Every structure is written in C-alpha cells, then in structure tokens.
Image (cartoon, helix red, strand yellow):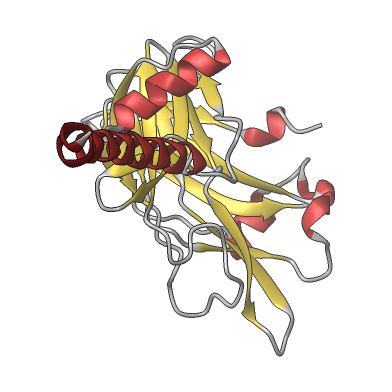
C-alpha cells in the first residue's frame, strides 16, 4: 500500500495531469481554427478542404488599413493580417491569413471563399483583384465616401516588365463612355513587382460618387502591361465584362 501511495499514485496523477494539459492545448488549438506555423501549410490544407490546387506561393505582403482618416474598424484593424498569392500556370489564387502568437497562421475568418483568377495568354493575359477592400468615410462633413483598397495585378505575359492601372468606381451610366470618369476621379498608384506575374500598389482611396449608393457601381481597374522598351503589350478593359 505504501508503495502505491508514495510511488505509483504520484506518477499516475502526473501522467493524468499531462494528458489533461495536452487535451486542453488540443481543444485550444481547434478553437483557434487549427493554426499552423507555415502559410504554405495553411494554404495546402485549404486546398484539400476545397478540393483544389493553388500551386506555389509567389508573392505576399501585410495588410495595413490603419492609415489616418479611416473611421470604421475593419477585419484588418489591430490584427496581423497578410495576403498571399499562389500561382499554378495561368491560375492565380488569393489567400488572406492572420498571424497569431507571432508564428502561427490561420485563415482570416471573414474570408471563407478564397478567390482565384484564371488568365489566358491569348485572350486576357492581365487582370486584377480588389478583394482587399474597406469601405470608409474620408470626409464626414461633406458625406464623401471612399474605398481603401490594396490593388494587386496579375499578368501571364513573360514580356511584361511594368504595369499601370487606373482605379475608380464606375457607375452604370458611365459604362459606355468611361473616359470622363477616368479623367476626373481615377487614381493610378505606382505598382512594384511582388513575385512571378504579380504586381502590387500602395493602398489608395478610391472615391465613391456621393450621389450613388455603394451597390450601384463597380470598383474597377483599367490595366496595361508594357515590355522593357516601353511598348504596350496587353491591356484589360473591365467595361467589356460588366453587365
């Protein structure tokens, strides 16, 4: 009995305590959406869940929406959020992840469906995404609204070394002749190459005309790609795809 009380029982309690602690850590891990120490591992797991394949990570960057003037808290405020682009051939896929505890990654909970973009070398070699966007008011007294975006451009033409884009909210009455709207309120950030076929620009404000609601217009980008000699190689006109 003394042997059990002084030798066996303490070791048994220690073993049970270790098992209980491991179970607690496991359930905590599950409650945090099962984070992993690698963005690539998270992306691969999401591929399995969605029965898809996104290729290799070719570009990434932090999501910063904390610039002065934003008055609406977003999903990115006070969180360490990053975007990742994976490429497989002419297919690009955007992932939005959150880093927790400094080394663990999990999907951003507000971004369930990871969008992908299939380009064509012949028909549409260049495209863009505005999936990182925040609606905000930049001038409350006048009621002027805007979207703060992180514009990301994709291009599958290997001769393209520089890209440009004009970003704006285009209203239905401007679809047939958008040039006046482009001249009056489009913004053209400077894009830098972030990876294989991926360019990213700073996050500007894209003004939403106050006379319209957010749901009546389209946030679009008119894109151009140039070769090393400065020749226009490809372009994309979003009005051709608006309904």
Residue at left offset 54%, top offset 10%:
51
Q: Is residue 222 above or below residue 101?
A: above
- The mark total stands at 0
Q: Where is residue 79 in the image (x, y as percent from the top left)?
A: 42, 60
Q: In which quarter of the image is residue 211?
A: bottom right
Quarter of the image for the C terminus: give it: top right
**Can residue 188 be seen?**
yes
State left or right for residue 141 relative to residue 71: right
Q: Position of residue 212 (x, y in %)?
A: 83, 63
Q: Quadrant of residue 29?
A: top left
Choose between 242 and 57: the one closer to the eye.
Answer: 57
Return the residue found at the far bottom: 141
Q: Is residue 68 above or below residue 134?
A: below
State left or right for residue 61 relative to residue 112: left
Q: Where is residue 47 in the image (x, y as percent from the top left)?
A: 47, 17
Quarter of the image for the N terminus: give it: top left
Choose between 169 and 86: the one closer to the eye.
Answer: 86
Q: Position of residue 132 (x, y in %)?
A: 52, 48
State left or right for residue 96 relative to residue 242: left
State left or right for residue 22 relative to residue 176: left
Return the residue found at the far front: 1
**Can residue 125 be seen?**
no
Choose between 102 and 236: the one closer to the eye.
Answer: 102
Residue at left offset 71%, top offset 90%:
141
Q: Is residue 83 above or below residue 148?
A: above
Q: Is residue 10 above or below residue 139?
A: above
Residue at left offset 48%, top offset 13%:
48
């Amino acid at each position: 009995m003394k042997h059990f009380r002084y030798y066996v029982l303490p070791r048994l309690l220690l073993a049970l305590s270790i098992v209980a602690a491991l179970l607690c850590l496991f359930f905590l891990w599950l409650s945090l959406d099962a984070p992993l120490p690698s963005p690539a591992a998270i992306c691969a797991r999401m591929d399995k869940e969605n029965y898809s394949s996104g290729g290799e990570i070719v570009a990434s960057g932090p999501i910063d929406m904390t610039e002065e003037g934003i008055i609406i808290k977003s999903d990115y405020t006070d969180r360490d959020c990053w975007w990742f682009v994976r490429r497989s051939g002419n297919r690009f896929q955007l992932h939005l992840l959150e880093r927790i505890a400094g080394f663990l990654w999990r999907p951003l909970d507000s971004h369930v469906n990871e969008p992908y973009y299939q380009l064509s070398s012949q028909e549409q070699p260049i495209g863009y995404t505005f999936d990182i966007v925040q609606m905000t008011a930049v001038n409350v007294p006048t009621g002027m609204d805007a979207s703060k975006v992180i514009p990301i451009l994709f291009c599958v033409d290997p001769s393209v070394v520089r890209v440009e884009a004009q970003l704006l909210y285009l209203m239905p009455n401007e679809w047939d002749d958008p040039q006046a709207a482009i001249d009056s309120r489009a913004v053209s950030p400077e894009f830098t190459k972030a990876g294989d076929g991926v360019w990213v620009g700073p996050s500007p404000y894209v003004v939403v005309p106050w006379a319209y609601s957010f749901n009546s217009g389209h946030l679009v980008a008119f894109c151009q790609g140039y070769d090393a000699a400065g020749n226009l190689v490809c372009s994309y006109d979003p009005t051709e795809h608006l309904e």
